Image: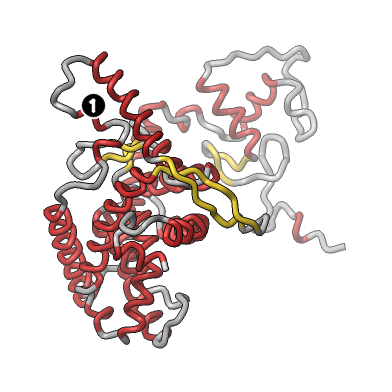
Amino acid sequence: MDLSASSPESDDFKICVVCNDRATGYHFNAMTCEGCKGFFRRTIKNSRKFVCSYNNSCIVTRQNRRQCQACRFDKCLKRGMKRECILSENELNKKRKIIQRNKIKKILNEAEQLTSDELSKLDHVSRMYNISENESYQSIKRFRNTEDMPNYSRYNIFNDSKKASDVKDFITSIESRLKGLSVIYVEDRVMKKNEAVSVNTNYIKHFADIMTIGIYQFINFVKQVPEFVTLDQNDQVALIKAASPEAILIKAATFFDHNKSKFVTFDNDLEYGFEELTEIGLSKEFVDRFKTFLAKFNALDLCKDEFILINVVLLFSSDRIGLFESNKINNNQEAYATILEKTMNSPEAKAKYNKNRLPEVIILLSELRELVFMYQPLATALNCQMKEGVLPDLLKEMLT
């Protein structure tokens, strides 16, 4: 039998000088196992005193090391373990800070920097996105049926008291639900049949206007992305139609206030809860899944540049249906995904989050697609069954 692996002289197997167990390294000036290291630290830090019942003559081994703490501690000292090697809490905190500083320095040295071309691309798409966003907000005049939303009366200047506001909110909510009530038939993919779903037409008009503004902004933005405008026109249309629903959902996430558990509009005039989403026909399963998505999005704590790059990455998805230049689109996505990765792993980001968040973004984009897939039957039903004029033409085009 080859005993070299278990030899005390072997480089890869050391013996604890206290109990003869397998040692893990030098601890407090002596080669010891984890058990004796912890025992010595606790004894010193807690100023514990032990008394041996057998005249301090116990033999300490791996099997019996817990039987006589006095002899074990005495052997620790005799084998070279030193009290002064135990750090106080203040000393430990100082050591942790030094380790953290060294870790940050290492991150700063290892971080891959954006090239000048990548910086130029990032600067351009960021400026174009902000311009399209400002233009969209300035174009907002009034969404249809704002007065029918449950919390509209909260901001009405005629409310003289909280009580009056609460009463009016309640009455407005009931009236809106009654006068806007309609029934559509939505396909159940599992049961392979149509189900009757109650929807509020007034709510649908209101949210349709909000979504349309978001689609206009997304289109105006992507038309300023250099790589997009060089694509075949059919591919441009296919990418916009496929990416718009995802862009709308991720944009909605930026308006979600987790403290209030509400979506807050551009100028904080209105708030929308999840109840309003069910009024336009969205299922409980979708709403629950959306809540999970919102929590994950919030946890990512994206900066504006990261959010904009995510929009570009989801735009250039080469697996969309009906594309002609898939390879070109895939190359564009990879280029912007690289910029996103470098941005998310910049020295500042790594120092702040102490992790690579890109895998979480990839998972988020996958869940975004799942959400769009979940509401497609409802979107199809609304597009086909709502009366003319309920859905704006652009939104209807996106839903086909």
Q: Which residue is found at the position 29% from the left and 19% from the top?
A: 166
- Report x, y in % for residue 181: 42, 40
Horizontal side of 261 relative to 76 (left or right) equals left
- Residue of label 1: 154
Q: Nearer the viewer, residue 250 or 46?
A: 250
Residue placed at 30% from the left, 18% from the top? 167
Left or right, residue 34 beside residue 207: right
**In the rendered image, the vertical position of residue 275 relative to residue 71, given as above or below:** below
Instruction: Work out which quarter of the rendered image holds the C terminus and state it.
Output: bottom left
Is residue 324 something that shows in the picture? yes
* Label 1 packing within 10 angstroms: few (<14), some (14-19), many (20+): some
Viewer-proximal residue, 239 or 194? Answer: 194
On the question of residue 368 being in view, the answer is no
> Of residues 362 and 8, which is closer to you in this image?
362
Which structural element holds mark 1? helix
Q: Position of residue 107 (x, y in %)?
A: 34, 57
Q: Residue lying furthest right in this view?
A: 1
Q: How is the image coloured?
A: secondary structure
Q: Nearer the viewer, residue 376 or 385?
A: 385
Q: Position of residue 158 (x, y in %)?
A: 15, 22
Identify the amino acid type marked 1: Arg
* Residue at screen point 71% across, 52% down: 8
Q: How many marks?
A: 1
Which residue appears at 32% of the width and 87% of the height?
A: 232
